[in-house]
Amino acid sequence: MEVAEMSEEDNGEEDDGLEHPTAEKQYVKALEDGKYRDMWVFCEKQHGELLDVSKEMLGKARELMDKYNDDYDADERVVSVVIGDDVEHLAQETIEYGADVALYQNDDRLERFLHRPYTEIFVEMARTDADWRDYDEPRYVVFPATNNGRDLSAQVQAELDSGLASDCSDLYIEDHEETNPKKTGEPGESKMFERTLHMKRPDFSGYEYSTILCLDNPEREFHPQGASVIPGTFDVPEKQNREGEVIEFDSELKDGWFGVEITDHDLLDEGVDLTGHEVVVALGRGIGDDPTLGMELGLELVDEFDDAALGITRGIVTSSYDFDGHVEEYTTEERQIGETGQVVQPEVYIAAGISGAVQHKVGMDESDTIITVNKDPDARIKEFSDYFIVGDLFEVLPQLKEAVAEGELKAVADGGLTEGEGGDDDV
Ligand SMILES: Cc1cc2nc3c(=O)[nH]c(=O)nc-3n(C[C@H](O)[C@H](O)[C@H](O)COP(=O)(O)OP(=O)(O)OC[C@H]3O[C@@H](n4cnc5c(N)ncnc54)[C@H](O)[C@@H]3O)c2cc1C
């Protein structure tokens, strides 16, 4: 391996004495002919437990690397990284969720996520020689797209001089044939990039998916190929009785990394809890023709059930609708369902005027029965609806309310609707 190091002099910039953010970067250097192996997974924890998204990523990493090893006749591993105080048992647990090797760093000062030390430790782990590995850097790294994971992933990948596809909702590994001269080195040539991590992510507010690839340039390598993953995208795997190597990492923590000291902490008031209800009625921007009336109709439907709550999309939270006072309190972020809101799994989820963007989907698609109302017969939400009602919510919601009042909703849900995709029917 050679290290192509870029100092301030090398890159032609004069030091003007100002503190540039990059001045603190330790590893502004690319590798040449580096050796890369394994998929690393940063496993975030909270209150002494692994977050579900950490388990979800481990399950996906296991699946990807099992296939990878079959496809490429290889023997590469899933490596988990756990940083915190008293985390050895969590490192052990990551093995049960799919890791082959669990690397952990313990220190009381690491109890809570801190940008600087967590970054320093991860980068040191990724770039330091060790007995258990014979490569320069991980081939792939995966982080959770949580607040902390987003923060860490961006800085780690910058320090490792590679790229990051953030907020991914699918990952797969395949060879990729590329014709872009920036990547091939020759106009008109094509080049095969083997073992490329394909990172799918929603773009344009969820209307399109992009597949991001992190490909080497002819004169420069980009590793690890890195992604952050939207929580809830993959299933939490079953715990298994697996064997693996648990390795304590012993970074010499520097006092200067702890410029921020957390002296006290408190849980924010969690506001409205939409979880645990039998029914959730959710409204989206389809209420736009008369936002106050739309909210009123949703609330009236909620009232017909014994145990229901009203949720909304981010589309409503960020809208500039002018709501009348009595419904306004239901239009704030604390009722938002989705990736950056709450995740609900009621027995019945009724979604009216919602298009079905992936960021909303991940907050509700584990619901037992999903009934949707949309004017557009091709709305994306149809793909994961059990019952898809094509119609104007201003007409359909009062009908649903009546059906519930008369005990007919169950009968409706049991049949009588026409063809749908996620399960069953349209009307
Ligand atoms: C990083 C990030 C995080 C995000 N997090 C979230 C999140 O947590 N939750 C979330 O919801 N979104 C989130 N979003 C936004 C998301 O991408 C969508 O923009 C949002 O979900 C769209 O809201 P909507 O379905 O209400 O609106 P639209 O997409 O505008 O859909 C409105 C739907 O209503 C239908 N309609 C219109 N009039 C009627 C009518 N009269 N009757 C019936 N149907 C009608 C239309 O056909 C359309 O399908 C996030 C986006 C990003 C980039």
Image (cartoon, rainbow, N blue to C red):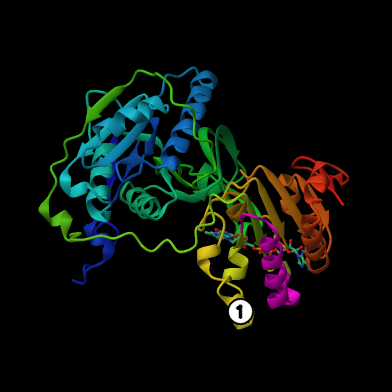
Q: Is residue 360 magenta?
A: no
In this picture, which residue range is highlighted in magenta?
Answer: 287-308
Q: Give coordinates of residue 175: x percent, y percent.
A: 57, 32
Ligand 1 placement by image quarter = bottom right
Residue lying at the far left in this picture: please name it. Answer: 255
The mark total stands at 1
Q: Is residue 290 magenta?
A: yes
Give the prevailing secondary structure in the magenta stretch.
helix
Q: Is mark 1 within 8 Å of ligand 1?
A: no
- The crowding category of the residue bearing disc 1, from other C-alpha atoms within 10 Å (few below 14, some 14 to 19, many at least 20), is few
Q: Give coordinates of residue 356: x percent, y percent.
A: 68, 55
Residue type (three-letter) at the residue carrying disc 1? His
Q: Give coordinates of residue 102: x percent, y percent.
A: 31, 29
Q: Give coordinates of residue 160: x percent, y percent.
A: 32, 46
Say which element carries label 1.
helix
Name which residue lies at 51% across and 27% down. Answer: 63
Name which residue lies at 48% across and 21% down. Answer: 69
Judge from the rendering whether residue 138 lies leftward or rightward of residue 234; answer left or right: left
Return the residue at label 1: 326
Q: Nearer the viewer, residue 423 or 2?
A: 423
